[in-house]
Image (spheres, helix red, strand yellow):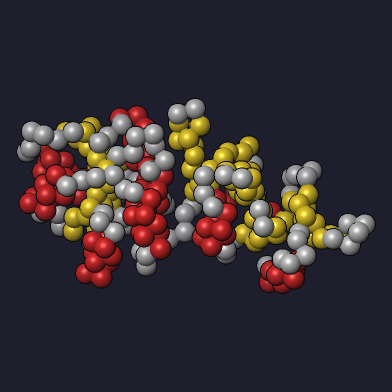
Amino acid sequence: MKILVVDDEVPARERLKRLIEEQDEWQVVSEARNGREALEQADETQPDIVLLDIRMPGMDGIETARHLAQMDEPPAVIFTTAYGEYAVEAFDASAVGYVLKPVRRERLLDALRRASRLTRPQLASLVSGEQHKTRKHISARIRGELRLVPVRDVIYFHADQKYVTVRYHDGELLIDEPIKELEDEFEGAFVRVHRSTLVAVAHIEALAKDEEGHYEIRLKGLEESFPVSRRLAPAVLQRLKEA
């Protein structure tokens, strides 16, 4: 089985590779120093298992796992962690594979044998856990390739039936995530202006009234404007005063 090793520390990667190379049933096909490299290598090598460090600069292991789950054939994920006992209990409750640092051979081999793909409920449990941080990227597959868009570049999210359009500086992509979950995750940077629309506070150019007295939002660099629902207007006004 093919394994991708991901850790920002060289000694940690070397130890994992050495332990794996002692076995005949697994093969390290690639390694990565951070989450973005991990996603690139996963696309290129199509590993069966990813050994994934949790604490990494930039994109942490939890966010990386969420993006890996977008692959057509997602790999199994085993987290490597120095977290304390409380966090380990959270992983156990989610049935997610993990090995504690410093990694011991017996524990690693046991985790590899029991490795399985993360399910949506397991991801949801991780995301709601204390160890979660808000994503820094939105991901989607376009023509078979994983596309990453920094959240800071997102101008708005707009829900239309099953999918959500993510509009950003250089274009747009479609994701399959509930607009309410996006609102909860990014509440610090986005504001709900309509039941189907979240806009980035940093990209708001103006809030104005139309001829009928209804509020509408204008966003920087876009010709289109978005209506603000009467129900949400007071909260939008308050949020802009605080920005």
Q: Is residue 201 visible?
A: no
Q: Residue furthest top?
A: 143
Q: Is residue 89 above or below residue 135?
A: below
Residue at image position (62%, 48%) is 159
Q: Is residue 59 above or below residue 93?
A: above
> In front: 5, or 132?
132
Q: Quadrant of the C terminus?
A: bottom right
Residue at image position (31%, 31%) is 46
Kindly indicate the quadrant of the structure image that contains residue 99.
bottom left
Q: Is residue 162 visible?
A: yes
Q: Quadrant of the N terminus?
A: top left
Residue at image position (75%, 61%) is 229
Residue at image position (15%, 57%) is 102
Looking at the image, residue 241 sits to the left or right of residue 53; the answer is: right
Q: Is residue 40 above or below residue 238?
A: above
Kindly indicate the quadrant of the structure image that contains residue 207.
bottom right
Rendering coords of residue 127 (x, y %): 40, 59
Rendering coords of residue 145 (x, y %): 45, 31
